[in-house]
Image (cartoon, helix red, strand yellow):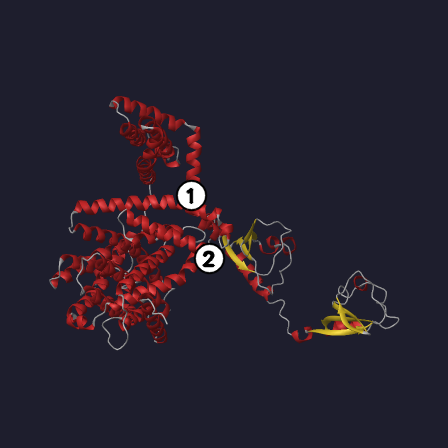
Amino acid sequence: MSDLAPLISDLALILVCAGVMTLLFKKLKQPLVLGYIVAGFVAGPHFGLTPSVSDAANIQVWSDIGVIFLLFALGLEFSFKKLMKAGGSAVISACTIILCMIAVGMFVGKLFGWKQMDCLFLGGMLAMSSTTIIYKAFDDLGMRKQRFTGLVLSILILEDILAIVLMVMLSTVAVSKNFEGGELVNSIMKLVFFLILWFVVGIYLIPLLLKRTRKLMSDETLLVVALALCFGMVVLAAKVGFSSAFGAFVMGSILAETVEAEHIDRLVAPVKDLFGAIFFVSVGMMVDFTMISEYIVPIIVIVLAILLGQIIFGTGGVLLSGQSLKTAMQCGFSLTQIGEFAFIIASLGVSLHVTSEFLYPIVVAVSVITTFLTPYMIRLAVPAYNWVEKFLPVRWRNWLDHYSAAVQTVSPENNWKKLIAAVVRIMLIYLVLSVAVISVCFQFVLPLLNSLLGDFWGRFTGAIVTLAALSPFLRAMIVKKNHSMEFRTLWADSRFNHAPLVILVLVRVVIAVSFVVYVIGHLFQASAALLVGIAILLVVGMVFSRFLKKRSIELERTFVQNLRSKDMQEEYLGGKTPAYVGQLLDRDLHLTDFKISSDSAWAGKNLRELDFGKRFGVHVVSIIRGRHRLNIPGGDACIFPGDMLQVIGTDGQLTDFSEQVESVDKAYVDENFEQHEIELKQIILHPGSPFAGKTIKECGIRNHFHCLVVGIGAMDDTALRSPDVNKPLQEKDIIWVVGEEKNLSALAGQ
């Protein structure tokens, strides 16, 4: 027998250990992540009672793939729109917690005399609470529906995205070996640039690709395409200097905005679980109990630093965002652990060879301890609040209540704020796209044209191609929001607004002209005055071009439609409340969904017969049937079992309608179900039978007797022939009939 490759035998050992430990930890109702870590310790080189992996380098490659899948899956659950809706409370809380916990980690590292890079990475590890562990703890404790848990989950979403940013910054610092502010600023600007570029281009192109290939997409094909996009972005991110995990997260977040997001998430889940398990097992392989015993004091200190730090700074951050003291303490006590991102950041330090060997097993030990303590810390929050409230001075309590009320009172934005925010957003997006277009044209298109057409004509054609590609973005950069409601209102409100508004437009024109000057000046030698003059003429032509206007509108409309397609599908299928419903609340009108059960007496009737408007005063806006939606149905529209009715009415009308829905659902409850048993019976057509000489259709066996002829035989033949409804029956025929007993008896009596 041929020997197995070390990779296969190592994988077998890992999966056997992981399988046994997951069953054990599932039985103990503990997080599976801890089971994987224990499995890694058992399969690792530091545990002598079992076989160990023979090639740790190969396992490290698999664990790197596991990180990619974990971040890709995290991106699929993330949404930039959710981030925008997370609210100021989550943003303020998350930023406060992360900054303070990084400082706590660095302070603890300095306390033990560790080197600077160990302290910095330790701070990053301590800053991120475990989304997986907290989700499970809330589920186990039955707290997912409580108010504070929603804020905790919003904070975790923000911590996840900020963890990606932190990983990029740590990578930059680790490579440059210094803490120069200029280097960090350049890294952040580079990060923002590529995030905007990838997100805008991805949202524009990827939904179009998936939409046009939808008929070709089986589960297998969609999985392969999704993973191809994921690893393509991983390679692209690595090429421009980011980590592979960052690229995976970005592609996951782009796909999260498509209508196929949930489908892709289901398909990727088994692959993610497999490679994620290998990653956490590889984490456990680095656990060395001799090293842990050596560093037991730092482990205990770090655990205490996490518990006290999250309680103090987590509570303080949530208080700073304007929440009540009780909510803040519940949030702070819930965040007292580290998990998967701590391992990923630790792996980053190991792969970059900038952290000490002892740091990884210390972090694993700390994670295990804080994970076990998480449910107890969550339960401890309310008793701790009661104790604090008992001894808190009345003056402090009143000040906190006043501060919370003041922060949560949101003042409406004025027109200047709305206009400036919109213009900045537009300029940022189109500046990034313009820079990307110029870079692509100069690096790829221009050399190709020079090789084909020669130097002069290549540069001339390259300038035309570059400016043509830039023109829709430059035009949008200049004219967008110049005819908006805010702009016109400010212009009409006061003549003192005219000058700032004109300056705002001129600044955008100057930026657009600068792009054109740069392109022409890069390709041709000319005086500054001539370059500026040509650029102004070209920009004026772009502004007044009807073709560019149409093209710019089409590009923006496609992008917005792709961005909203997931929300539109959820609204179409009844999973999301339509936007217009909010405008009805002031008029005491509401939209409510009602499910038509299979037993409903309304099933099979049309809306004209049911006359909901006259009987209850409500109106059916839509009928949702599976993945089909019928908007503003007419009177002939029928209701079927399983339909979802979206109904508009006042509170009182909808209450009466709901009671009627419940009553008609019970209308067809049949207590005499035994009488409806279907039986099979043979009926012989004797001479003189009223059915002899008539067709089955003419006999009315189905319509009058509610029975069904399933076969016809003869007395001298055992074979049955299929019934023909248009062929006359003959005397001595044997007809085989199914039906209820009473109906069969009535038929046989003829």
Mark 1 surroundings within 10 Å by alpha-carbon count, few (fewer than 14), some (14 through 19), many (20 or more): few
Task: Please report whichever mark, 2 or 1, sits nearer to the chain's N-terminal start.
Answer: 2
Q: Please, what secondary structure does the residue beneath circle 2 have?
A: helix
Residue 610, image quadrant: bottom right
Tell me the element at label 1.
helix
Residue with the most extreme front position: 1
Residue 421 placement (x, y as % from top left)? 32, 40
Q: Nearer the viewer, residue 269 or 89?
A: 269
Residue toward you, 435 or 225: 225
Could you say where residue 635 lies in the image, as x and y percent from the top left?
Answer: 63, 50
The reply to whether residue 326 is visible in this rendering is: no
The quadrant of the image that shows the N terminus is: bottom left
Location of residue 185 by image quarter: top left
Residue farthest along the bottom direction in this orientation:
49
Q: Is residue 533 left or right of residue 645?
A: left
Whether pointer 2 and pointer 1 mark residues with C-beta atoms closer than 8 Å, the reply is no
Q: According to the image, label 1 marks what residue? A: 560
Answer left or right for 512 relative to 564. left
- Name which residue lies at 19% across and 53% down: 174
Q: Quadrant of the C terminus?
A: bottom right
Task: Give the number of the disc on residue 220.
Answer: 2
Q: Amino acid at mark 2?
A: Glu
Residue 520 x/y as whole percent? 30, 28
Nearer the observer, 166 or 351: 351
Q: Is residue 532 left or right of residue 484?
A: left
